[in-house]
């Protein structure tokens, strides 16, 4: 209990917020690493997911691959990448991208596939091109599920981004590693609390986004 | 002229022969009905016209032009399509559903919406429904919207796949009357698929009765088919022997009353 109070006191101390090693700077770094990882994963996984969902092809292969990637322990992958790439932020970023891809991918293809088949068929029969079907029908109808995938990925990445401090002086994870080394448990706990709060805030934000996106499907009152 | 099926066949990838060898000409500005039991290949044939299905062999021609050489998207934009049920875009309002194809074709949204409102009136829908979403409509109203949508780009051809199959008999009757009124005004070439013979007889100028495999059992006007069914299958399918089709007259209070085989009154002979 005192450790917890000490951790809160540590966080409340304005002296710990300023400077290049301060909480503000580390919060921003942590957020930046998370965003870059999720964006990079999205750039890869969203187009691929849309393609799989739209064509209903290649799903088995990609799901198996994504499952295999998911099964690799992130810390192990990070160690391996760090050995290959050396110290710095690149190795953890890559590991985080690998962590995020399966969730984003699943959200994208599940979202696209969730579009009512009768509506998609009618859209095609009316003379929409495949691209127009994706843009005008499948994406609006599947947007909620797609953003749900982004939300899940972001949550995983923001928690795991503590590992960025394993090979570089980046993010809130640094407090955990320093604290562990110096047996400064309040500082360690403070780091963990800050990560948890950041994760909660991001999750709230994305929950709102998911809600908005779901409303694009607009089946409206009474009907699911 | 019109739509010609020339020796078309369709074998699906799993080996199912949906249509073996079908030939027929649908005349311009007429309503043709494809009837037949479930699985006889009606939908397969209908969807060959807008190339939602490409035949495994044979050709489909529209106004003497082989459609295999045409761009699918452009072909479909000039053919109206009414699916069996649903098929409206659930995330778009009624008016925007109807305006879909004109907007794709480059008509401004405002103009397309204006025309859509006129079409809603044409199919018997109140303009107050225009801003609703499909889920807020009854099944019958949804089908009217689907018909309006199919007419929006002013296509020459209208394809309808059991368009009124999912609504109750009274509403179906209203929708059929509405379609006949619209047709009297617009004179489209319409192909309608149904397994309701009464619907085919009520709507169509020409009826094609299909057996399994898209084999034509008989084709002709409703009158000729009912007057001389080609064989026992057609006779049974059109219900030529059904009590309500075998009418006799009887005299009641000086009036010539038409009654069915069960003696139920159908009308008065003048
Ligand atoms: N995509 C497909 N793959 C394999 N077989 C199919 C496919 N679509 C239809 N068939 C088969 O082809 C045959 C004709 O199907 P079709 O849908 O044209 O019949 P239909 O006359 O429209 O029947 P219904 O009245 O039930 O709608 C059926 O045996 C059906 O099972
Ligand atoms: Mg069918």
Image (cartoon, grey):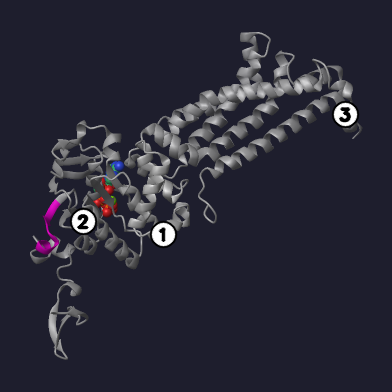
The percent coordinates of residue B199 (x first, y second) are 24, 62
Question: What kind of element bears circle 1?
Answer: loop
Q: Are marks 2 and 3 on the same chain?
A: no
Q: Residues within 10 Å of mark 3 (few under 14, many from 20)?
A: few
The answer to whether residue B40 is visible is no
The residue under label 2 is B35
Chain where mark 3 sits: A
Q: In this rendering, do the residues under marks 1 and 3 share a single chain?
A: no
Q: CA distance from mark 1 to mark 3?
A: 64 Å
Residue located at (30% from left, 39% from top) = B77
For this view, does B137 lie left or right of residue B16? right
Q: Residue A31's spot in the image, x, y percent? A: 70, 24
Could you tell me how far apart the alpha carbons at marks 2 and 3 are, in whole angstroms? 79 Å
Residue at image location 43% in from the left, 60% down from the top = B138
Mark 1, residues whose alpha carbon is within 10 Å: few (<14), some, or many (≥20)? few
**Residue annotated with mark 3:** A12
Q: Which residue is mark 1?
A: B126
Q: Nearer the viewer, residue A131 or A150?
A: A131
Which residues make up the magenta segment?
B216-225
Res B141 quadrant in image: bottom left
Q: Is mark 3 within 8 Å of ligand 1?
A: no
């Amino acid at each position: 209990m005192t450790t917890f109070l000490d951790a809160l006191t540590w966080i409340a101390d304005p002296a710990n917020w300023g400077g290049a090693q301060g909480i503000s700077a580390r919060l921003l770094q942590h957020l930046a690493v998370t965003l870059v990882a999720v964006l990079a994963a999205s750039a890869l996984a969203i187009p691929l997911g849309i393609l799989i969902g739209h064509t209903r092809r290649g799903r088995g292969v990609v799901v198996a691959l994504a499952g295999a990637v998911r099964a690799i322990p992130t810390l192990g992958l990070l160690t391996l990448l760090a050995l290959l790439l050396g110290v710095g932020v690149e190795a953890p970023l890559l590991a985080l991208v690998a962590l995020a891809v399966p969730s984003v991918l699943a959200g994208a293809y599940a979202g696209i596939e969730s579009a009512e088949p009768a509506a998609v068929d009618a859209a095609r029969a009316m003379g929409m091109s495949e691209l127009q079907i994706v843009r005008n029908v499948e994406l609006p109808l599947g947007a909620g599920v797609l953003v749900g995938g982004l939300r899940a990925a972001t949550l995983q990445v923001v928690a795991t981004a503590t590992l960025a401090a394993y090979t570089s002086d980046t993010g809130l994870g640094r407090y955990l590693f320093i604290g562990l080394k110096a047996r400064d448990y309040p500082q360690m706990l403070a780091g963990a609390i800050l990560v948890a709060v950041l994760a909660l805030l991001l999750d709230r934000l994305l929950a709102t986004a998911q809600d908005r996106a779901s409303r694009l499907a607009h089946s409206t009152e009474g009907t699911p | 002229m019109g739509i010609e099926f020339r020796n078309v066949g369709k074998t699906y990838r799993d080996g199912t022969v949906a249509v073996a060898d079908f030939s027929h000409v649908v005349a311009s500005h007429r309503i043709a009905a494809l009837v037949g039991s479930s699985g006889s290949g009606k939908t397969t044939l209908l969807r060959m016209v807008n190339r939602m299905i490409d035949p495994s062999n044979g050709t489909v021609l529209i106004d003497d032009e082989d459609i295999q050489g045409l761009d699918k998207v452009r072909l479909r934009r000039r053919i109206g399509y009414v699916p069996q049920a649903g098929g409206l875009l659930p995330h778009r309002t009624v008016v925007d559903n109807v305006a879909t194809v004109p907007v794709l074709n480059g008509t401004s949204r405002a103009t397309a919406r204006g025309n859509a409102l006129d079409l809603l009136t044409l199919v018997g829908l109140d303009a107050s429904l225009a801003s609703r979403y499909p889920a807020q409509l009854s099944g019958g109203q949804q089908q009217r919207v689907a018909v309006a949508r199919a007419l929006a780009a002013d296509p020459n051809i209208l394809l309808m796949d059991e368009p009124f199959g999912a609504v109750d008999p009274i509403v179906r009757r209203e929708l059929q009357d509405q379609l006949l009124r619209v047709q009297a005004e617009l004179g489209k070439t319409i192909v309608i698929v149904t397994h309701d013979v009464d619907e085919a007889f009520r709507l169509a100028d020409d009826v094609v009765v299909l057996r399994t495999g898209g084999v034509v059992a008989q084709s002709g006007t409703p009158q000729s088919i009912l007057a001389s069914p080609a064989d026992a299958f057609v006779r049974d399918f059109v219900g030529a022997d059904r009590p309500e089709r075998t009418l006799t007259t009887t005299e009641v209070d000086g009036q010539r009353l038409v009654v069915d085989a069960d003696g139920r009154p159908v009308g008065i002979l003048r």
